[in-house]
Amino acid sequence: MPKKAQNHKNRKKKISVDQAWPLINPNAAGVDLGSREHWVAVPEDRDKQNVRCFGTFTSDLEALADWLKECRVTSVAMEATGVYWIPLFQLLERRGFEVLLVNARQIKNVSGRKSDVLDCQWIQRLHTYGLLGASFRPADPYCVVRSYLRYRDELVAGRSTQTQHMQKALQQMNVQLTQVLSDINGLSGLTLIEAILKGERHPLKLAGMVDRRVKCSQSQIAKALIGDYRAEHLFELKTAFELYHTYEAKISACDEELARELEKLPDRVDVKVKPLPAKTSNKAIDENLRLGLYLKLGVDLTAIEGIGALVALTTLTEVGPDLSRFKTEKHFTSWLGLCPDNRISGGKVLSCRTRRVINRLSDALRLAATTLERSQTALGAYYRRMRAKLGAAEGITATAHKLARILYRLLKHGEAYVREGMAEYEKKHQERKLKSLQMAAKSMGLELVQKESVAAGVS
């Protein structure tokens, strides 16, 4: 029989499937979350009414947990729906349940479920057979710090919005402050805006308030401060100016709370036994902050080129120092959305683009990759080579992927980072290219001969 016909016959051959699936989680429950009510399903043999509806008040959540205890449930699966899952997740975790937060993509495309009751039953059934994977969530102390840092980012975004409102109001009054100052949020910019709001209109007096380090002359600044000070635009400027300082105060308060919670995190290393490595770069980073990150992470991430205090702090709050939930660095980079998402059908690769994920750490690593453009190190040479080969966006993602792998190795194994120079990297790259050419030549029955050897033979 021809080989092609034999393969076709093998594909058509029926395969028997064992219908008796093992119960991986026999004491499992499924929860379908909502803003006003939660539907919960437990195994049918645990209660006559194995599907119940509970409200979302705290007393209702306590009653839900009590009912699960009565039904001898030990593991609960719920779908990640907005922020509705957070109160119930935290309460069940405190009550000793194993809680799985499931990505909606795993269960959203299943047909035949037309009501909330069937939704929770389906989640319970999938979890019973072990077909649901839990989304990654760091330990609770790191979640606390993560909440503060994420809210700080929102405060910074709000402050930036007020800066834009101030710029718009100044532009409408034709006060060209942005042409003579690089930043209106600086000392000189805020001093001028405050003086304008207090009623000062004389351009020369206003120009005299500018810091002497400003490059533009006072005559240029005075010319830029002549404008049409209309009442409605002054009101907009005043409101934005006050809100800007309100956000500044709230950011400072958030920083204090963040520092207080960071102190509560357990130390991963004893500096007396394993002191902080010496600084190997010219990064502008506070030594106290560097030491604090080293104590909480167990390794000095700021030794990596491109990784500063912000990326190290984001790593601490988003994933924590324990990466045991990720089996390999490939699983870690896949969770970050920094590796190719190969879509294959019929042996043909349809797409290899990265998945679209919302992950603050991957965003921070992409930003860190862009700082390596002029770095005279191995990572800098890698970034430039990937950017020339793949393009700007793909090169940044490839470099962020490499940074993520380095982070995983340092945190997983507690190793110290060893910096590699650009010359050593280029030498290894040339060796890899030569080895590839030798293998290609060998596959065609050829042999590569070095130019020096040929010249020596001729002489």
Image: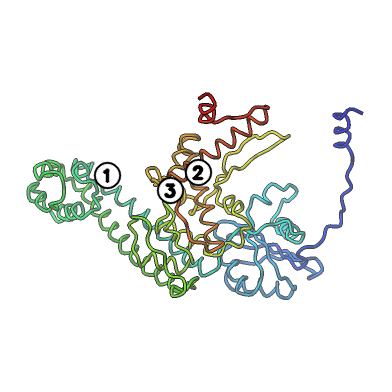
Question: Which of pointers 2 and 3 lies earlier in the amino acid sequence?
Answer: 2
* Closest to the observer, 73 or 16: 16
Q: Point out the tag, 2 or 1, that comes first from the N-terminus.
A: 1
Q: Secondary structure at mark 2?
A: helix
In the displayed structure, would residue 67 be above or below residue 190?
Answer: below
Amino acid, disc 2:
Thr
**Contact, mark 2 vs mark 1 (Cβ under 8 Å):** no
Residue at mark 3: 421
User: How is the protein colored in the picture?
Assistant: rainbow
> What is the spatial separation of the Cα atoms under label 2 and label 3, in whole angstroms?
22 Å
**In which quarter of the view is residue 19 placed?**
bottom right
Front of the two marks 2 and 3: 3
Quadrant housing residue 327: bottom right
Query: Percent x, y for residue 378?
Result: 45, 46
Q: According to the image, label 1 marks what residue?
A: 168
Tell me: residue 366, above or below residue 69. above
Q: Quadrant of the N terminus?
A: top right
Tell me the crowding category of disc 3: few under 14, some 14 to 19, or many 20 or more residues within 10 angstroms, Cα based: some
Q: Closer to the camera: disc 2 or disc 1?
A: 2
Position above or below: 146 against 440: below
Look at mark 2 in the image and give the residue it sits on.
397
Residue at image coords 50%, 39% = 394
Tag 1 and tag 3, C-beta contact below 8 Å: no
Image position, residue 105 (x, y; %): 64, 49
Q: Is residue 215 rendered to the left or right of residue 10?
A: left
Q: CA distance from mark 2 to mark 1?
A: 35 Å
Quadrant in the picture for residue 255: bottom left
Q: How many residues crowd mark 1 within 10 Å: few (<14), some (14–19), many (20+)?
A: some
Q: Is residue 164 left or right of residue 442?
A: left
